[in-house]
Image: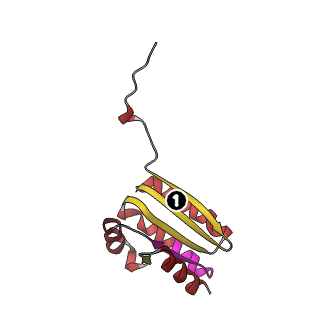
């Protein structure tokens, strides 16, 4: 007996990410849509990553949308890292996501760079 499956109703994660440790730093590559639940899960993983390294770079090159209401989570994470001698920088956003970040982040608290190398240079300078 075959069962019909409506693929549109299947719950797939809206966003996925990978974490790459690099000494006292961590690169987090994110893909998909970052809604409320995804941002909460990402923030929790960033907290775990921050235990391994004080410098975090978020590569948002494959992110198609960010819920602006969740940007306070990233801003708070950046503040906590800065308070402990670390840093957080974002990189490789498309124009749409960059506009959300620029308008929605509290007091421009999130640093966004076009290239990954620039983000690494920024976290290295701020964390030293």
Total numbered circles: 1
* Residue 110: x %, y % from top left: 44, 76
Name the residue located 52 percent from the left edge and 56 percent from the top edge: 17
Please tell me in which quadrant of the rendered image residue 94 appears: bottom left
Foreground residue among 116 and 126: 116
Estimate how packed mark 1 is, as few (under 14), some (14 to 19) or many (20 or more) residues with alpha carbons within 10 Å.
Answer: many
Magenta residue check for 97: no
Magenta residue check for 78: yes
Query: Which quadrant would the C terminus be assigned to in this image?
Result: bottom right
User: In the rendered view, how is the structure colored?
Assistant: secondary structure
Is 100 left or right of 120, judged from the image as shown?
Answer: left
Foreground residue among 92 and 88: 92
Is 105 left or right of 38, judged from the image as shown?
Answer: left
Above or below, 23 against 40 in this view is below
Name the residue located 63 percent from the left edge and 63 percent from the top edge: 48
* Residue 1: x %, y % from top left: 46, 12
Name the residue located 35 percent from the left edge and 35 percent from the top edge: 8
Is 114 left or right of 77, judged from the image as shown?
Answer: left
Residues in magenta? 77-91
Q: Does dot 1 land on a helix, a strand or a loop?
A: helix
* Residue 61: x %, y % from top left: 43, 64
Please tell me in which quadrant of the rendered image residue 81 appears: bottom right
Which residue corresponds to mark 1?
Answer: 42
Q: Residue furthest top?
A: 1
Above or below, 39 against 93 in this view is above
Foreground residue among 38 and 121: 121
* Residue 78: x %, y % from top left: 52, 75
Name the residue located 49 percent from the left edge and 58 percent from the top edge: 40
Is 45 left or right of 1, judged from the image as shown?
Answer: right
């Amino acid at each position: 007996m075959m069962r019909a499956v409506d693929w549109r109703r299947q719950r797939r994660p809206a966003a996925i990410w990978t974490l790459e440790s690099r000494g006292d730093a961590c690169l987090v590559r994110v893909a998909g849509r970052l809604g409320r639940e995804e941002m909460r899960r990402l923030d929790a993983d960033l907290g775990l990553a921050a235990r391994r390294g004080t410098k975090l770079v978020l590569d948002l090159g494959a992110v198609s949308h960010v819920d602006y209401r969740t940007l306070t989570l990233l801003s708070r994470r950046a503040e906590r890292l800065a308070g402990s001698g670390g840093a957080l920088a974002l990189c490789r956003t498309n124009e749409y996501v960059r506009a959300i970040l620029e308008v929605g982040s509290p007091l421009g608290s999130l640093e966004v760079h076009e290239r990954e190398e620039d983000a690494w240079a920024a976290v290295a300078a701020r964390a030293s």
